[in-house]
């Protein structure tokens, strides 16, 4: 995942708050992926407009963490979603 | 121990809206005794059931049949499910859907479509589905689906007669812009059990299919996701049916019976509660059918002392019933089952029936079913 690439949740993939289990999940065709706080924080910033660089910059400020580290973690997480076609990327 | 009290809430529900279907695939998973149209649940009852399901913890709703498009109220049902907060997945052959109807489903909030594929050309697909013109219509429906922008999964059922078309099926999925394809080797339940002579793949075919899928997964990584169900009788271990009995999913039949799996009605000593009589949550946690094979306490040897018992939960109860005559036996697909050698031999015999013809599924409550 490059800094200038723009991640977007494609149609049919959406965030959902599960009131019964009290967790955030990512709903996708045939799948419900349980999200931890970090995963949810990253996906909440994905709006189809801002680039990966901008998103991670914002998260770094929010969590007061080095941007390199945030980039590394987020790239792994988003890359895994991308491989399953739960995330599209444009540049 | 998983009991009524410790069972987790279900994640998925399969709503079999109707057993009516214009097609008559010889591997249809519908029961031999199908529900009559008059007995089908009303729009209001389904609407209530969807809300009960969401309140119980269901996230994914699969709307299936038969052919769900045979229900005239399909759009209303999708809207009701969407309102309840469920992720809606329509499992269809495409027959009965027009562009207008698809646009209505889009407006009602349908999340995803799963389109079945009987073959890659009209000659094959229409012979398997027993419906002339079905393939051409399906291709039109696929175009509309893509045009509207629904996320699409192709759902291919493979068997001895069409396994050679797998490479073309993968190409087709790519051309249509599908994100996923389910490549499922036929599982022997329902009508498929009567068609083992015509459908059973050979061992070589089963191996070749796995090879093609493995290669395609690498080649298409990030473009097309392939979910694969391998040939059951040729496997070493059985499949974990429904993710474990009464642990992740439930089925509601057209007439309102709540089943732990779609074939559960083949186990004669089980009784099933109906959504008309009892709240869904009560059925899930306390219904006798759901507690019959929950967890591992019901197991006998060799499952009881096996280290895979929480991996596959002893395999499929309905298959143990159908093939060994005992629903609490080890699934005979397992190499540890005392019946496995006989099953392997039987599979080879079925696969060697070159000229076997199909017993097509019949319409609900009309033609009598062929006997074994
Ligand atoms: S498997 Fe074939 S006959 Fe059965 S419901 Fe699906 S399309 Fe209809
Ligand atoms: S013995 Fe039972 S639990 Fe063990 S692998 Fe076979 S079916 Fe699964």
Image (cartoon, rainbow, N blue to C red):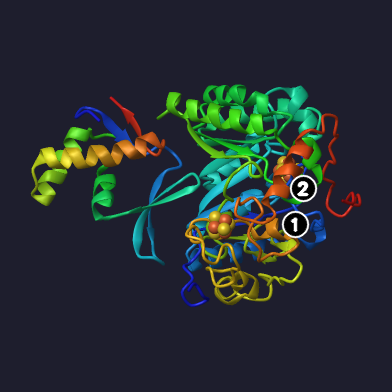
Mark number for residue B17? none
Q: Which chain carries label 1?
A: B
- Name the residue beneath numbered marker 2: B193
Q: Where is residue B216 in the image (x, y as percent from the top left)?
A: 49, 26
**The residue tagged with tag 2: helix, strand or loop?**
helix
Quadrant containing ligand 1: top right
Of residue B218 and residue B345, the one placed in the foreground of this image is B345
Residue B134 in percent (x, y) is at: 75, 30
Q: Where is residue A64 in the image (x, y as percent from the top left)?
A: 8, 49
Q: Dot 1 corresponds to which residue?
A: B322
Left or right: B37 in relation to B241 = right
User: Where residue A47 sits in the image (x, y, percent)?
Assistant: 29, 40
- Nearer-N-terminus badge (2/1): 2
Q: In which quarter of the image is residue B40?
A: bottom right
Residue at position x 70%, y 50% in the image: B65
Q: Is residue B140 above or below residue B32?
A: above
């Amino acid at each position: 995942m490059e800094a200038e690439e723009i991640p977007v949740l494609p149609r049919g993939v959406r965030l959902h708050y599960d009131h019964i289990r009290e967790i955030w999940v990512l709903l996708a065709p045939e799948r419900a992926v349980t999200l931890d706080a970090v995963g949810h924080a990253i996906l909440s910033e994905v709006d189809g407009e801002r680039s990966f660089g901008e998103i991670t910059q914002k998260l770094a400020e929010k969590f007061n963490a080095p941007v390199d580290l945030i980039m590394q973690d987020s790239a792994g997480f988003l890359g895994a979603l991308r491989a399953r076609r739960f995330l599209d990327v444009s540049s | 121990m998983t009991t009524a009290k410790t069972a987790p809430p279900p994640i998925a529900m399969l709503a079999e809206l109707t057993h009516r279907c214009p097609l008559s695939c010889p591997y249809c998973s519908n029961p031999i005794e199908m529900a009559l149209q008059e007995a089908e649940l009303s729009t209001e009852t389904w609407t209530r059931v969807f809300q009960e399901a969401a309140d119980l913890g269901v996230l994914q709703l699969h709307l299936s049949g038969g052919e769900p498009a045979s229900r005239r109220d399909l759009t209303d049902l999708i809207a009701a499910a969407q309102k309840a907060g469920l992720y809606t997945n329509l499992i269809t052959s495409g027959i009965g859907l027009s562009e207008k109807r698809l646009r209505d489903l889009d407006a009602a909030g349908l999340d995803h479509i799963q389109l079945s594929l009987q073959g890659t050309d009209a000659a094959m697909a229409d012979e398997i589905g027993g419906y002339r013109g079905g393939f051409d219509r399906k291709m039109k429906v696929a175009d509309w689906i893509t045009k509207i922008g629904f996320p699409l999964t192709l759902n291919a059922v493979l068997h001895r007669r069409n396994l050679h078309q797998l490479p073309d099926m993968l190409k087709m999925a790519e051309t249509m812009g599908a994100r996923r394809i389910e490549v499922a080797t036929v599982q022997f339940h329902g009508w498929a059990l009567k068609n083992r002579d015509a459908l059973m793949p050979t061992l070589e075919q089963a191996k070749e299919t796995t090879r093609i899928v493995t290669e395609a997964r690498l080649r298409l990584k990030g473009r097309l996701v392939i979910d694969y169900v391998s040939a059951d009788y040729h496997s070493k271990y059985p499949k974990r049916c429904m993710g474990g009995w009464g642990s992740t999913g439930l089925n509601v039949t057209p007439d309102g019976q709540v089943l732990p799996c779609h074939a559960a009605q083949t186990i004669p000593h089980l009784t099933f509660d109906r959504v008309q009589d009892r709240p869904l949550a009560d059925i899930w946690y306390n219904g006798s059918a759901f507690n019959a094979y929950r967890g591992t306490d019901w197991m006998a040897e060799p499952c009881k002392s096996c280290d895979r018992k929480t991996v596959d939960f002893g395999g499929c109860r309905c298959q143990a019933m159908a093939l060994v005559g005992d629903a609490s036996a080890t699934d005979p697909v397992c190499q540890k089952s005392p019946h496995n050698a006989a099953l392997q031999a039987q599979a080879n015999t079925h696969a060697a029936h070159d000229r076997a013809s199909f017993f097509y599924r019949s319409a609900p409550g009309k033609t009598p079913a062929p006997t074994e």
